[in-house]
Amino acid sequence: MKTFQQSLWLAFLTSCAATLLVSCSPPAQKDGRESGYYGDFNRVSNALVSIPGVVVTNFWINRDITLEEFGFDVTTATGKPVHIAIGEPDALRRLPRAELVEALRKEIERK
């Protein structure tokens, strides 16, 4: 009887560990859609790649229950590297597409 209880306990712990492991990953994939968990990240990424002469060379994401902060390293047409960081309260996250592209273009020029 003790072996059966140990087997049940082991199965329960394994199930809990698997559930915890799965629940820690982001709720969606970074697939380019501008809505959902990665929506703001994808909107900014899509806006950056639409700017002529700008190449995204790297990115980072702070994953949590919500996507808090993220950023990009870009290179301009002149070869100048620029780091862009977007925080959770950043107004860029709420701009319409055309305004976002223009704001990012200006930020890149300023740096």
Image: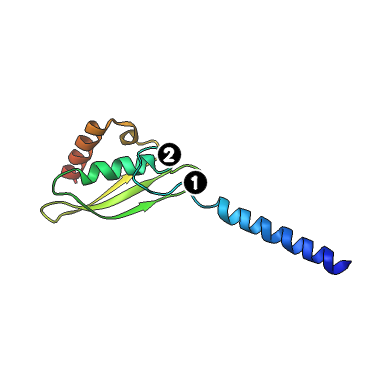
Q: Would you say 84 lies left or right of 23 here? A: left
Q: Residue at x 40, y 39 (%)?
A: 88
Q: Could you tell me if the residues under marks 2 and 1 are in contact, i.e. CB atoms within 8 Å?
A: yes
Task: Look at label 2 and name its amino acid.
Answer: Gly
Secondary structure under the numbered disc 2 in the rendered image? loop
Q: Quick one: quadrant of the N terminus? A: bottom right
Taking the spot 46% from the left edge, 46% from the top edge, the residue there is 28
Residue 63, percent from left and from top: 45, 49
* The furthest residue to the right: 1
> Percent from the top left, x then y, of residue 42?
33, 43
Instruction: Quote the CA–CA distance across marks 2 and 1.
Output: 9 Å
Residue 30 drawn above or below residue 14: above
Residue at (35% x, 44% y) in the render: 41
Read off the residue under disc 1: 27
Q: How is the image coloured?
A: rainbow
Q: Which amino acid, by three-letter code, is at mark 1?
A: Pro
- Residue 89 is situated, as x and y percent measured from the top left of the image, at 39, 35
Instruction: State the image coordinates of residue 6 (x, y, percent, origin top left).
Output: 80, 66
